[in-house]
C-alpha cells in the first residue's frame, strides 16, 4: 500500500512487528486459538512495543502519528502470519479514536497513558441482544441522579475484547428519545469493569477471530461518575457516526491485508506442496486462478490507497469510505475463497492458515455496516 510516513521508519516498524510475531505469537497461537483467548499479559507486550501508542499524542506517551500507514503495516504483518492480536483491534481501532476525538483534556490525562501501555484495555459496547445497534431498540439505560451520577442497567453483546477490558465505552439511554429523533438521548459512558454490578457474561464462540475475547456484558445498578461521560450528553449516535468513515477504512485495509496474505499462502502451497506427479502450481488453471487473484488484490490496493490519501487530507467522506469497504471486503472474500479452493482438503482444516483467514475475514462484510447497508449509503450519495 501507499506509504505516507518515512520509509525508513515504516521499514523498521515492520521488521520489529514481524520479529515479534514470529518469536512470540506464532509459537503460542495454536494454544491461544484452542483456548479462544489471548493471555492478558500479551497486551502489556504490545504496549511495550508501542503498538497502542501509534496515534496517541506524544504528551501522553504515544508516537503522535496522524496517518494510518503504521496501522496498515500492522494489519499486513498480522495477516501474513494468519494470527490475531485478540481484543487489541477494538482497543486500537474503535476505542482510541473516540477517546482522542471526544475526551476532555482531564479525561485524556487519566486514560491515555494506560491505553498506551496496555494497563487499561478498552472495549466498545453498542449492540444489544435481539435488537442490534438500532437506536429504537436500545434498552440499556443510565438515568442521571440528582448528584450527577449515572446508574447503568442493561446488557450488551458482541463486545470485542470484553473479556479482558478494564474500561468499556457503553452506549446507553440517558434521556427519552424525541418523536422526530429516536437517536436522541443516547450517551457514551466510560465504565470501570471493576465497578459493582458490572459482569462479564457468556464468552461468545465466533466463527472466526477466535481469540478476540468477544463477550456479553451485563450491568446492574452500575454507578458511573459524571466525569466519565464521553463527549456530549445524548449525542452518542452522532459521535459514533463521525467515526464510521475511519472505521470502514480500517476494515478495508484489513481485508486487503488478508487477501494479499491468502495469495502468499496459496502460492507457497501449490508450489511447494507434495504433488502426485508435478507441483499444482505447474497446472495452467492454478496459474490463471492465482493471476486473477493477484489482479483483484492489486485493484483493492488501489482503492484502499485512494481512501487512505483522502483520510490523510481529512477528505474521507462517508460515501467514499463505504465504497472502499464494500469493494475491498467483497473482493477479498472472493479471493480468499478461491485461494482456499486451491488448497483442496488441506484448506478445510481449522488449523490451516488459509482457513483462519477465510473465517476471520467473513465478519468484515458485517462490521461497519453490512454490504447492503453500504450499498444503500452509496446509492443515496448518487441521488438514487
Image: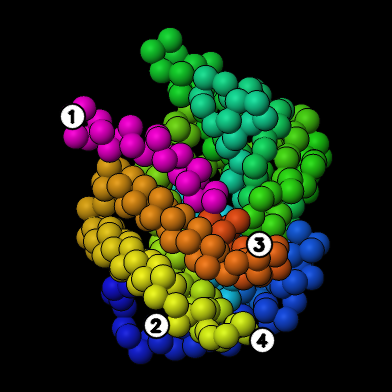
Q: CA distance from mark 2 to mark 3?
A: 35 Å
Task: Relative to 176, say whether 120 is above or below.
Answer: below
Colouring mode (rainbow / by chain / secondary structure / one colour): rainbow
Q: To which quarter of the image does residue 221 belong?
A: top right
- The crowd level at tag 1 (other Cα within 10 Å; few <14, some 14-19, many 20+) is few
Circle 3 sits on which residue?
Answer: 348
Circle 2 sits on which residue?
Answer: 10
Report x, y in % for residue 345: 65, 65
**Residue contact between numbered discs 2 and 1, judged by CB atoms under 8 Å:** no
Mark 2 or 1: the one toward you: 1
Q: Along the polypeptide, which appears first: circle 2 or circle 3? A: 2
Task: Relative to 214, say whether 347 is above or below.
Answer: below
- The crowd level at tag 3 (other Cα within 10 Å; few <14, some 14-19, many 20+) is some
Disc 1, SS = loop
The boundaries of the magenta stretch are: 362-384
Nearer to me, 221 or 38 = 38
Tell me how many marks there are. Answer: 4
Q: Along the polypeptide, which appears first: circle 4 or circle 1? A: 4
| Residue 326 seen in render | yes
Nearer to me, 243 or 332 = 332
Circle 4 sits on which residue?
Answer: 23
Mark 1 or 3: the one toward you: 3
Q: CA distance from mark 4 to mark 3?
A: 26 Å
- Which of the labelled discs sits on residue 383, or is there none? 1
Which residue of the protein is positioned furthest toward the left in this rendering? 383
Amino acid at each position: 500500500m501507499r506509504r505516507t510516513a518515512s520509509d525508513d521508519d515504516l521499514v523498521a516498524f515492520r521488521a520489529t512487528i514481524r520479529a515479534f510475531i514470529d518469536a512470540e505469537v506464532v509459537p503460542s497461537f495454536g494454544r491461544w486459538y484452542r483456548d479462544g483467548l489471548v493471555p492478558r499479559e500479551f497486551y502489556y507486550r504490545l504496549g511495550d512495543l508501542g503498538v497502542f501508542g501509534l496515534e496517541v499524542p506524544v504528551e501522553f506517551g504515544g508516537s503522535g502519528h496522524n496517518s494510518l500507514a503504521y496501522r496498515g503495516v500492522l494489519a499486513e504483518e498480522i495477516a501474513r502470519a494468519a494470527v490475531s492480536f485478540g481484543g487489541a483491534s477494538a482497543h486500537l481501532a474503535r476505542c482510541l479514536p473516540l477517546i482522542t476525538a471526544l475526551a476532555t483534556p482531564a479525561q485524556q490525562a487519566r486514560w491515555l497513558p494506560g491505553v498506551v501501555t496496555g494497563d487499561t484495555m478498552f472495549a466498545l459496547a453498542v449492540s444489544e441482544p435481539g435488537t442490534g445497534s438500532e437506536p429504537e431498540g436500545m434498552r440499556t439505560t443510565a438515568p442521571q441522579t440528582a448528584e450527577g451520577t449515572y446508574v447503568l442497567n442493561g446488557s450488551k453483546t458482541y463486545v470485542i475484547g470484553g473479556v479482558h477490558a478494564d474500561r468499556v465505552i457503553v452506549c446507553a439511554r440517558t434521556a427519552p428519545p424525541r418523536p422526530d429523533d429516536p437517536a436522541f438521548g443516547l450517551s457514551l459512558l466510560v465504565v470501570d469493569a471493576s465497578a459493582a454490578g458490572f459482569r462479564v457474561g457468556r464468552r461468545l464462540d465466533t466463527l472466526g477471530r477466535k481469540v478476540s475475547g468477544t463477550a456479553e456484558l451485563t450491568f446492574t445498578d452500575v454507578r458511573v461518575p459524571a466525569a466519565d461521560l464521553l463527549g456530549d450528553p445524548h449525542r452518542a449516535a452522532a459521535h459514533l457516526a463521525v467515526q464510521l468513515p475511519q472505521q470502514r477504512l480500517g476494515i478495508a485495509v484489513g481485508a486487503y491485508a488478508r487477501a494479499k496474505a491468502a495469495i502468499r499462502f496459496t502460492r507457497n502451497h501449490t508450489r511447494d506442496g507434495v504433488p502426485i506427479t508435478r507441483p499444482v502450481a505447474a497446472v495452467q488453471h492454478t496459474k490463471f486462478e492465482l493471476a486473477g487473484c493477484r489482479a483483484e488484490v492489486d485493484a483493492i490496493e488501489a482503492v484502499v490507497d485512494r481512501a487512505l490519501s483522502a483520510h490523510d487530507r481529512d477528505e474521507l467522506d462517508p460515501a467514499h469510505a463505504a465504497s472502499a469497504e464494500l469493494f475491498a471486503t467483497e473482493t477479498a472474500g472472493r479471493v480468499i475463497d478461491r485461494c482456499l479452493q486451491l488448497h483442496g482438503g488441506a484448506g478445510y482444516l481449522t488449523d490451516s492458515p488459509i482457513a483462519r483467514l477465510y473465517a476471520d475475514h467473513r465478519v468484515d462484510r458485517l462490521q461497519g455496516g453490512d454490504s447492503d447497508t453500504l450499498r444503500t449509503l452509496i446509492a443515496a450519495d448518487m441521488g438514487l
